[in-house]
Amino acid sequence: MKYISTRGKAPELTFEDAMLTGLARDGGLYIPAEIPVMPKAEIAALAGLSYEEIAFRVMRPFVGDAFTDEDFAEIIQKAYAGFGHAARAPLVQLGPNDFLLELFHGPTLAFKDFAMQLIGQLFQVALSRRGERVTIVGATSGDTGSAAIEAFRGLDAVDVFILFPNGRVSEVQRRQMTTPTEANVHALALEGDFDDCQGKLKDMFNDFTFRDEVRLAGVNSINWARVLAQVVYYFSSAVSLGAPHREVSFTVPTGNFGDIFAGYIAKRMGLPIRDLVIATNQNDILHRTLETGAYTTQAVAPSISPSMDIQVSSNFERALYFAYGGDGNAVAQLMAELKEKGAFPVSQGALESLRETFSSGRVSEEETLAAIAKFHATTGEVLCPHSAIAAEVAARRGTESTPMVALATAHPAKFPDAVERACGQRPALPARMADLFEREERLTEVPNDLAALEALIRERISK
């Protein structure tokens, strides 16, 4: 299995090299040169298997010979051993044909754990085998950072630096990043918004001297292995609802487009997905793009769903690559326009392709609060703001025969103020995290300046 860049200028890599590299050297994102298709019989055979067994069968074709079957199976077992639910990603019924996919039973109570715990184990095995050390730098709007720190803290071959927008994540999200005591993890509070953090991360990858000096690696959703891990729960949930003999639809709360792009890959693999619905908050650039055909950034408006407070959705580049028929030059041109002008037009043909695959909905702040209250009153479920946005957009479709699965991407206890404001219930943290607010914090405030960030990382990495 080979991996190619969405911009067409970087060399092909193996799965392991693409995983350890993160961003391609031409600035593009790695994708499989071919997407393997699972026959209906193989999808049907997933019914009744454990999450780990499904994960092995879904991901194995993408890994190639990077890991033996025995090693890969062991990596998967270790990745999900710390989850708090035996099903790992359980389904909860909200209505006659409406379901919630709970993705918050991992160590940091967010869907990012599904990918990050796996990547932590993959990196550990690959780097130990190579005798190498890397520096991981990530940008987060809230959940990626804590999941990365949890997955990599204490590992010998990795230093981890996480950039998050100062004052723009929830207190629980911040403390999950700033309270680990291991010396190899560093929480950096950057002055700016998430797009500033993500921009500085990409600038570091494009500074090849720095990149090579510190052996830079990335675990944001720009990393293909992140997307691959998320493909699995589309299969596990769809099969539970009757696939491949029945179509299933999904509504996904998304800002950076990685989670819903995983659903697109599942569909390309043969999973009978009818609708993939993008659910956005007030920072609705993906919704506006599908409606207007123009990707036009605006100022980020802080919200009660901060993980979606994004205007530059990195993984949308992968969707554009397929919408433009694999034309890397066209994608590179669009990304250059985005960097220069903050906007680009989507061609009519590409827009039609996107609209054939994706639909979208927008939920305002007031509607988000109302949705949390409504679902609590009608189902007893307490939803985080992101999950409520997905459930609300899903509910707007009306009555359909196709099951609709809304992705619940975070535990409500990560956003207690918003949840309490909406429904009067203040969700408690699980017992294993009950002392989170008593732990000492360790963070560094940093300017929105590339040279300063690179100097700090050089100073702190283990030699």
Image: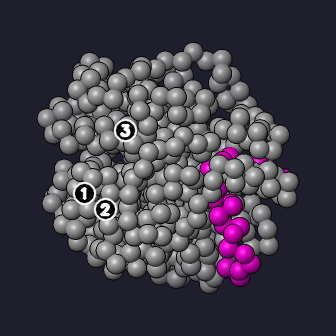
State the CA–CA distance, disc 2 to disc 1: 6 Å
What amino acid is labelled 2 in the image? Phe
For the N terminus, the quadrant is bottom left
**SS for callout 3:** helix
For disc 1, the neighbor class at 10 Å (few under 14, some 14 to 19, many from 20) is some
Disc 3: which residue: 196
As drawn, is 59 to the left or to the right of 23? right
Q: Are marks 1 and 3 in contact (CB under 8 Å)?
A: no
Position above or below: 96 against 28: below
Image coordinates of residue 300 in percent, x first then y, are 47, 44
The residue segment tinted magenta is 380-402
Disc 1: which residue: 337
Q: Is residue 386 one of those drawn in magenta?
A: yes
For the C terminus, the quadrant is top left
- Residue drawn at the location 59% of the way across and 60% of the way down: 362
Image coordinates of residue 239 in percent, x first then y, are 62, 72
Q: Which mark is residue 113?
A: none
Q: Is residue 152 one of those drawn in magenta?
A: no
As drawn, is 364 to the left or to the right of 460? right
What amino acid is labelled 3 in the image? Asp
